[in-house]
Image (cartoon, helix red, strand yellow):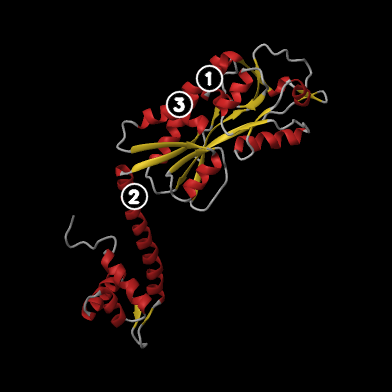
């Protein structure tokens, strides 16, 4: 490079000085802010005027005011320095993320099935992974209060500063005791006259979804047993005490009950001569944008790979369902 050639961009210190002059309203006040001499500030302004080949200060006024060119430079310099600050913080946040313990919260069915594969996939990283489980409302509250860094929930609720990436979705199925004689052309209300309906509690998202679905379909099923988790729910079904609406991932979480249960699609039931419409739930990865470097993307991709190439196939083979039990999202959002 020719040492006599003019640089293509002005020095950052010159831009910082110019911003200080414009924002403070005078060279003397900028001197105080920058903690350098007035001569040094004046020299930096002259360097900028030489670089751009135009006057930046109208020195005929007291105090001197920026010219049109000077005002345009101020606007661009302010934007550039803001972006530079964001760049520094972003790079530093990646470095911090590599050294920190990462707290990941997951709904129970995810933690017990996909969770181990996720931990295995992250085992080669430098992160310390802490996996917590719970129901969606609790996990949403924990990530809002920064007690979690990442959360896998069944909520698409949008809140300030938190991004959500769809991972996959799954349909609901009716679960019956093995050997139960299911009558043809039966509605869920009619089924409820033969077996007690065993529910997820209304404080869980899965319970709310099922209740809303039944209400929309016009089915009235008596409230008897309610549970937050799948294990006790399927235990009663396996013992012939009732039926439930649940999902393949929940069943896979409690797969020790599979020999004693029968999984039937909602389309096998009819109401007013028409098959029930599908009901499904989706899983989302919630995280704060820009705070964990590439980790959210790594987690998203690991989960999708595990769901598509292992979990979905294992569940389909075990429950004799269609191959694509888990419908994996390909979206970046």
**Residue at 40% over, 63% down:** 79
Residue 283 in picture, x, y percent from top left: 54, 35
| N-terminal-most mark, 2 or 3 | 2
Tell whether 181 sits left or right of 304. Answer: right
Residue nearest the viewer, comparing 207 with 289: 207
Tell whether 333 sits left or right of 86. Answer: right
Q: From the image, state whether disc 1 or disc 3 is nearer to you.
A: 1
Q: Which residue is mark 1?
A: 255
In the rendered view, would you say 76 is above or below 310?
below
Q: Is residue 326 visible?
A: no
In the rendered view, would you say 107 is above or below 94?
above
What is the spatial separation of the Cα atoms under label 1 and label 2, in whole angstroms?
41 Å
Q: Which residue is mark 2?
A: 93
**Residue at 66% over, 25% down:** 244
Residue 53 position by quadrant = bottom left
Q: Which residue is mark 3?
A: 306
């Amino acid at each position: 490079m020719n040492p006599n050639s003019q640089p293509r961009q002005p020095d950052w210190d010159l831009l910082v000085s110019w911003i200080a002059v414009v924002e403070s309203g005078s060279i003397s006040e900028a001197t105080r802010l920058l903690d350098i001499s007035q001569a040094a500030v004046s020299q930096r302004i002259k360097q900028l005027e030489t670089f751009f080949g135009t006057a930046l200060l109208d020195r005929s006024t007291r105090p001197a005011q920026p010219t049109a060119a000077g005002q345009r430079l101020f606007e661009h310099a302010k934007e550039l320095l803001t972006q530079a600050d964001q760049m520094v913080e972003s790079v530093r946040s990646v470095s911090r993320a590599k050294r920190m313990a990462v707290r990941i919260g997951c709904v129970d069915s995810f933690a017990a099935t996909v969770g181990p594969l996720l931990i295995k996939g992250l085992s080669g990283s430098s992160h310390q992974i802490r996996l917590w489980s719970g129901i969606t409302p609790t996990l949403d509250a924990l990530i809002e209060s920064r007690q979690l860094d990442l959360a896998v929930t069944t909520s698409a609720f949008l809140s300030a500063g938190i991004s959500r990436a769809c991972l996959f979705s799954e349909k609901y199925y009716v679960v019956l005791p093995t050997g139960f004689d299911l009558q043809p052309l039966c509605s869920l209300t009619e089924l409820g006259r033969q077996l007690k309906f065993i529910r997820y509690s209304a404080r869980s998202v899965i319970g709310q979804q099922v209740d809303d679905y039944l209400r929309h379909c016009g089915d009235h099923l008596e409230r008897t047993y309610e549970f937050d988790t799948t294990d006790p729910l399927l235990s009663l079904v396996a013992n012939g005490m009732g039926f439930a609406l649940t999902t393949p991932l929940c069943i896979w979480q409690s797969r020790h009950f599979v020999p004693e249960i029968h999984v039937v699609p909602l389309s096998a039931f009819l109401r007013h001569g028409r098959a029930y419409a599908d009901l499904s739930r989706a899983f989302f990865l919630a995280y704060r944008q820009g705070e964990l470097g590439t980790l959210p993307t790594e987690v998203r991709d690991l989960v999708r790979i595990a769901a598509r190439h292992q979990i979905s196939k294992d569940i389909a083979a075990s429950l004799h369902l269609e191959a694509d039990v888990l419908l994996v999202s390909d979206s970046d959002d």
